[in-house]
Amino acid sequence: MLRTFRKGGIHPPDNKLTAGTAIKRLPVPGVVYVPIAQHIGIPSEIIVETKEKVTVGQVIARSGGFVSTNIHAPVAGTVTKLDKIVDSSGYKKQCIVIRTDGKDIANIEETIFPLKKEIALGPKEIISRIQDYGIVGLGGATFPSHVKLAGRPDTQLDYLIVNGVECEPYLTADHRLMLEKAEEIIVGIKIVMLALGINKAIVGIENNKKDAVALFKKLTENESGIQVAALQVKYPQGSEKQLISALLKREVPKNGLPPDVGVVVNNVGTLFAIYEAVQYDKPLTERVVTVTGKKIKNPANFWVKIGTPISDLINEVGGMPEGQYKLINGGPMMGKALKNADVPVTKGTSGILVISEEEALRKEVQNCIRCGECVYVCPMGLEPHLLMSLSEKALFDRALSEDILTCIECGSCSYVCPSNRPLLDYIRFGKLSAKKLEISKN
Amino acid sequence: MTESIIYSVVLLAVLGGLAAMVLYAVSKKFYVYENPLIAEVEALLPAANCAGCGSPGCKSFADKLVNTEDISALFCPVGGNEVMKSIAEKLGKVVAEKDPTVAVLRCQGSCDVRPKTSLFQGPKSCAISALIYSGETDCQYGCLGDGDCVTACKFDAMYMDESTELPVIITDKCTSCGACVTACPRNIIEMRPRNKRDLKIYVGCLNEDKGGIAKKSCELACIGCSKCIDVCTKGAITIENNLAYIDGLHCTLCRKCVEVCPTHSIVETNFPPRKEKKPEIKEATQESIKTEADA
């Protein structure tokens, strides 16, 4: 029996249409829009001016504090303006617009980095390099990685968990990366283990990616510190707390973080970015993005420069199908609907999903029938139906005492609700209001 | 027969007497003294329990009025100066005098001038849709049209106009309690001075985008052209972030800015028609507000 997390969870249809197609490189776009708020924490500060020439990997926005990170120019070219562009949040946000220089060699030729296994740097240098090169968690949360790795003095770490779960339906970016860059990821694991001063790591991969499991098992045969574990397929296993529960049977306390149980979790994409930053001085300027959807002609995975407009990606897979469609940034479960196709790819964009109108349209909302299905599937052990009605009635102090803030917004409750109730919409609103209330109380 | 009647009557009388004694003792023992002034002040308050003053209800506001030394910071927006004056007389304290205000919707983005570019299917609540994205139109500053303000209004002074999908404020019923201002996630509703005959001039737009972008998302958007500043003799207009703002306290309602505004984003309400020597006084009805706003 394969391992999985203890409470709740659902089994949405996989729809991994692009699992078999290799990652292609997207041609460098003509214009990139680089938002300055791509990570959780303080937005970066712009340090370039209009009409300034930038080279690939040049810092264009400096870290705005400890929980913040640098942003680098993804292409060589000229800064044409500093403007506000609608980003994945649905609002206009400050962006740096760079027109690509079509003649620059760095834009035309792809540099190939051979595998480099020897790690020349010490722990402190590794962490400062991760900070300088703008590495953030690429699983979707975009939490600056150096903050995670800097650790806390009061906690004793013993495990690095490598997140190769990719439990979101449709997305295959991490899966393909694991198949194509397995050795690099393993070096990345060793780099992070060195930085944290720990000697145990577990790679967690869901069992619908049998090829990745087999490959990692083969490559880590002689590595005593690195284990590879195949996990039962269940959503939301890719969430930190659920993954820790599945692999180590440890429960992260309420309002706590993985270091409280001695664990640091990193996504495979992040580890690959760390590998490139540490071994080859390469800042985070590109990532793998799955572009998919049932009606898309040629769904595929791409290496995409940060700041590329999503319309470029859609054109590359055969354009938008006819009719009305819903564009989602991320997977179908936790992804966010986009306002238009001009939204740029950011560090957190793991996939672009195109969903047809009939799939996307919500069904009529009916009354709660108290079936308890949402309680049964909630991986955090909450009562979503209760939290929804508390949010609806603006009883935020009670919602707070019902632990609304521990909700991970996985959407399992909305997925299973037979009455089609918008549970997550209300809970998300309640969470925000409850957080405000908590801050005003303290 | 008569015996049983007598028994039950006597028994009930005795029980009643005992209960009365217990109740009397308890009411004496647990008597809570309340300043009779509180009840008197409460009687003066409008009893709307709207929380516009900051207290949960009229009773607690009365309690606050009686028990606070300096009540110049406290004000009942529903009762206004009249009520506050009578309270001041009763309590012998000094109260602040405030100019009456009225809620004003600073957005004219009806369906025909502000085209929809996307469809939102989530719960019908402005607070929730504002969390997720910038609204069904391309204007991220304007009205979301889900009517959180209408739900918040306890005086039936607002309703949703189905043709424009914008809320309408019935000025006569508005008590300026401020519930709609708090409910609106976009801060579109502003409390502006209530002028004679409900005359109002204000910029009906909050779009801070540059002219071209603003105009593209909404025909009636303020483009920050500063023509209104040039004609204003009182210096009541300021422009910040490509958006004009008319200070209601300095505005003399001369209507010069309304004439020069190229996008018609400056709204005038309840003014008599132009070029007439003897202006008629219009009633501030719902229709007049609506037609003026549409015009």
Image: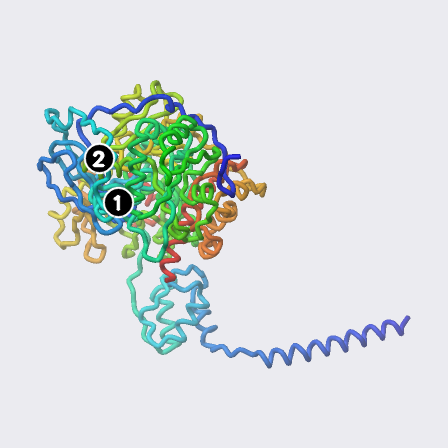
**Chain at numbered mark 1:** B
Q: Secondary structure at mark 2?
A: loop
Q: Residue at x 21, y 54 (%)?
A: B247
Q: Secondary structure at mark 1?
A: loop
Residue A55 position by quadrant: top left
Residue A219 position by quadrant: top left
Q: Residue at x 24, y 37 (%)?
A: A118
Residue B99 position by quadrant: bottom left
Q: Between residue B74 and residue A216, name the one nearer to us.
A: A216
* Residues at marks 1 and 2, CA–CA distance in whole angstroms: 43 Å
Q: Amino acid at mark 2?
A: Thr
Q: Between residue B205 and residue A191, name the one nearer to us.
A: A191
Q: Amino acid at mark 1?
A: Gly
Looking at the image, residue B66 lies above or below residue A10: below
Q: Residues within 10 Å of mark 1 (few under 14, many from 20)?
A: many
Q: Nearer the viewer, mark 1 or mark 2?
A: 2
Q: Is residue B76 visible?
A: yes
Q: Is residue B218 visible?
A: no
Q: Quadrant of the C terminus of chain B?
A: top left
Residue A189 vs residue B50: left or right?
A: left
For residue A201, the mark is: none
Question: On the image, numbered disc 2 is attached to which residue?
Answer: A285
For residue B204, the mark is: 1
Residue A134 vs residue A106: left or right?
A: right
Q: Residue at x 91, y 70 (%)?
A: B1
Residue A32 vs residue A427: left or right?
A: left
